[in-house]
Image: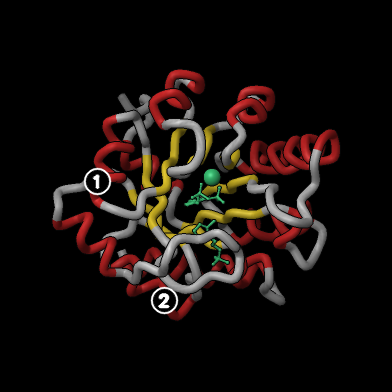
Amino acid sequence: MSSSMLPDVVRRHLQMYLVLGSANCLAEPGWVVQEALAGGATMIQFREKGRDALTGAPRIELARRLQDQCRRAGVPFIVNDDVELALELDADGVHIGQDDESAASVRARIGNRMLGVSAHTIEEARCAILQGADYLGVGPIYPTISKDDAHAVQGSAILHEMRKAGIHVPIVGIGGITKDRVEEVIHAGADGIAVISAVTRAERIRAAVEELKKKVILSI
Ligand SMILES: Cc1ncc(COP(=O)(O)OP(=O)(O)O)c(N)n1
Ligand SMILES: Cc1ncsc1CCOP(=O)(O)O
Ligand SMILES: [Mg+2]
């Protein structure tokens, strides 16, 4: 069972989905999130992991601060991997991958909160849906500089293939998506884009988000 959230509502949240942790940001993460929200980001994922990531109390403090900004803007705040943290914060949802806790177990723990699951194949996608995923994160569609242990690049064809196989749940494309690739990703079947570097490394974050979102909406 998925959550009680309507698929069309989830689709709208996926349009311009910013994924970030402090190590991705060239500027202070609170400022990055503020600018991204001002530019129209539709969902934010707290992904504080990897080599230079915060741990312990500073990590939780940052999560609370970013969550508070999202709440004020009315934008869902999703926690990557860490179900415990999501429950502690009363976050809007959790995103997990194939190497994380099983989707069925996370669904049972988070109740009606939003559940996103990474899927690289049609089989993984079907399994995630059966276990209660509200949306699928599919990628890396293109080469990425933001995830050391990323799967092989899949290209936009995987999105086509999933749709052709009858997978109709909300899907967000992720991995190396830039403004020049948005149209291809949406036309291949994604409902939105999830990005790290295209926003966190942009010189003008607000303008970058505005432009990415506009391209998504024009491509739908
Ligand atoms: C929206 C979205 N899609 C995919 C991922 C990747 O999740 P995962 O495979 O678990 O890898 P990590 O992000 O945990 O390193 C994601 N985070 N968000
Ligand atoms: C978390 C994640 N999962 C697949 S690719 C990726 C990183 C996306 O970052 P970028 O948008 O900078 O390529
Ligand atoms: Mg994960």
Q: Is mark 1 within 8 Å of ligand 1?
A: no
Q: Which quadrant does the N terminus fall into?
A: top left
Label disc, if present, on residue 218 of the rendered structure:
none
Q: How far separated are the C-alphas under marks 1 and 2?
A: 26 Å
Residue denoted by label 1: 123
Which three-letter amino acid code belongs to the residue tagged 1?
Glu
Q: Which quadrant does the C terminus fall into?
A: bottom left
Q: Position of residue 209 (x, y in %)?
A: 57, 66
**Is residue 77 visible to us here?**
no
- The crowding category of the residue bearing disc 2, from other C-alpha atoms within 10 Å (few below 14, some 14 to 19, many at least 20), is some
- Of labels 1 and 2, earlier in sequence is 1
What is the basis of the colouring in this image?
A: secondary structure
Is 23 drawn above or below residue 182 in the view shown?
A: above
Q: Is residue 146 left or right of residue 220?
A: right
Is 25 drawn above or below residue 133 in the view shown?
A: below
Could you say which is closer to the camera, residue 103 or residue 26? 103
**Is residue 16 visible to us here?**
yes
Task: Classify mark 1: helix, strand or loop.
Answer: helix
Residue denoted by label 2: 181
Q: Residue furthest bottom?
A: 180
Could you say which is closer to the camera, residue 74 or residue 101? 101
Residue drawn at point x = 41 percent, y = 60 percent = 139
Which three-letter amino acid code belongs to the residue tagged 2?
Arg
Is 34 drawn above or below residue 180 in the view shown?
A: above
Q: Is residue 187 left or right of residue 205?
A: left
Task: Classify mark 2: helix, strand or loop.
Answer: helix
Residue drawn at point x = 24 percent, y = 46 percent = 123
Residue drawn at point x = 56 percent, y = 57 percent = 40
Count of numbered labels shown in the rendering: 2
Q: Is residue 95 left or right of residue 127?
A: right
